[in-house]
Image: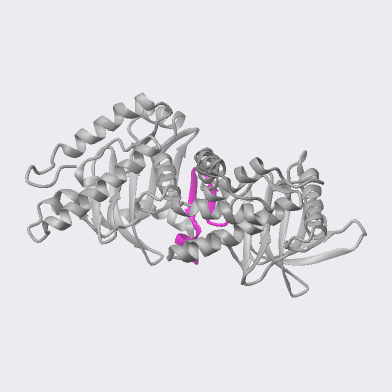
Amino acid sequence: MAEFPFQLLIRCPSGKTETLTCASLLRSIPGRREVYDAFWKDRAVIVKSFSHRISAKRHLKREWRGLRLLQQRGLNSPEALFFGKTEDGRLALVVEKIVNSLTVLDVFNRIKEKAKRLDLLVLIGKELANEHNRGVLQKDLNFGNFLLDGNKVFVLDPGQMQFSSRPVTRNKGISQLASLASCLADSNTESIPQLCREYLKARGWSFRKSDEMLIHKQILIHRKIVIRKGLKKCLRTSKKYLRIDAGENIAVFNKDFCQGADPLGFIEQIDSLMDKGQILKNGDTCYVSRLTWNGVDVVIKRYNHRGFIHSLRHTIKKSRAYRGWLHTHRLGILNIAAPKGLAYIENYKGFLVWKSYIATEYIRGQRLYDFLRDGDVTQQERSEVTQQIRGLLDKLGKHRISHGDLKHTNILVTKDGPILTDLDGMKVHRFNWTYQRYRAKDRARLLKNWPKETFEI
């Protein structure tokens, strides 16, 4: 890993060499590109470094051309400053940093009021209509590719845009609008018709019932794409995640979790840290401990080595920690209550996964079994939690997800409602008949210890 800050020299085509100071790594796709937060002549900039030996030149050219075309078409975007080669032969592009701005995704997640969220949606829908009127089509459309500076919207990632001499067609535009709406974890169906109306109005068109039907259909398609892309991002270094390849270990950390701490030290000392923590479970299959690290109350689950065949099987089909990490993020994207994934680690012996670990936030709550039998809990409270659990199961069913071990100890009742835990046995089913079979098993497991005197699930 590079030590920050460091100086980066870029030799431009004119022969002039520019010196920049890179302050931090924002994103990394190994063997392809890195994105740095940097300074150039006391000016805040973003540096994109392209390293792929075949596609680097094409990607640089596409980004440079895209930024210039956006400016020519009167769309707000960061200014392209210069490009060139680094000392080690990589191609690099330097663009303006929009200081004090936030991605629309970050802004949206901070807003709690539905009306204000809808206002933000409408603002971005109008910006999208503005792009489409000017013949600009974003192939990677998501809230992370828009910056908000006050009420001014900036578009990013021009390398993933198509530029045409004619405006985007109606159906294609509505499909893009659906892609935007599908980025929302808690997409609100009643707001979609208004969003569609405002977009069409900005395009100079009237709203038709068929438009609403089309956008709902497209949202289902795009949501699957959003999940697939989101799961890829949580496995590599990006704005939110840090991937570490260190000797026998591969790990991914949530950057907020390891901010200001030493993630390598955490990896190397994880077993001793767990031993010093509060032991929650110590079995042949797994070892669970609660501890505090970097000021965060965390639960770490270690999946133990159980022989060569066991390791070979989990190397081929991926470790349980790896699968649990993906499932925490899948449920997060779908707005289904689960503990936040903070890190996962795989320990290798040769090519085999030997042990694996997953760290999640500690959730303060009452086990469902205890909640249902708590004499201080009112019938009204039991009824509300029962309804919330039905809602959780309905959400899982909508996306053909089975939990795999839906016993009462794996559901925590918190002040914000029930939360699913222990996700490594979760499955996403391609076919409805397989889902129905696993759903029946989940339901049977849930009802096994359900008190007869309480409300039925």
In the rendered image, the residue lying farthest to the right is 14
Q: Is residue 261 visible?
A: no
Assess whether residue 208 is covered by the magenta stretch. Answer: no
Give the residues in magenta. Answer: 239-260
Residue 100 rendering spot, x and y as whole percentages: 62, 72
In the figure, 88 relative to 175: above or below? Answer: below
Quadrant position of residue 307: top left
Residue 210 rendering spot, x and y as whole percentages: 55, 40
Q: Is residue 179 left or right of residue 205?
A: left
Q: Residue at x 16, y 53 (%)?
A: 382
Q: Residue at x 31, y 59 (%)?
A: 291
Q: Nearer the viewer, residue 379 or 318?
A: 379
Residue 177 rendering spot, x and y as whole percentages: 59, 48
Q: Residue at x 77, y 41 (%)?
A: 53
Which corner quadrant holds the N terminus? bottom right
What is the tally of numbered marks visible in this picture? Answer: 0
Which corner quadrant holds the C terminus? top left
Assess whether residue 250 is covered by the magenta stretch. Answer: yes
Residue 134 rendering spot, x and y as whole percentages: 76, 53
Q: Nearer the viewer, residue 295 or 183?
A: 183
Q: Residue at x 93, y 59 (%)?
A: 14
Q: Is residue 64 visible?
A: yes
Q: Is residue 286 left or right of residue 170?
A: left
In the figure, 20 relative to 369: above or below? Answer: below
Q: Nearer the viewer, residue 105 or 359?
A: 105
Quadrant position of residue 431: top left
In the figure, 307 relative to 103: above or below? Answer: above
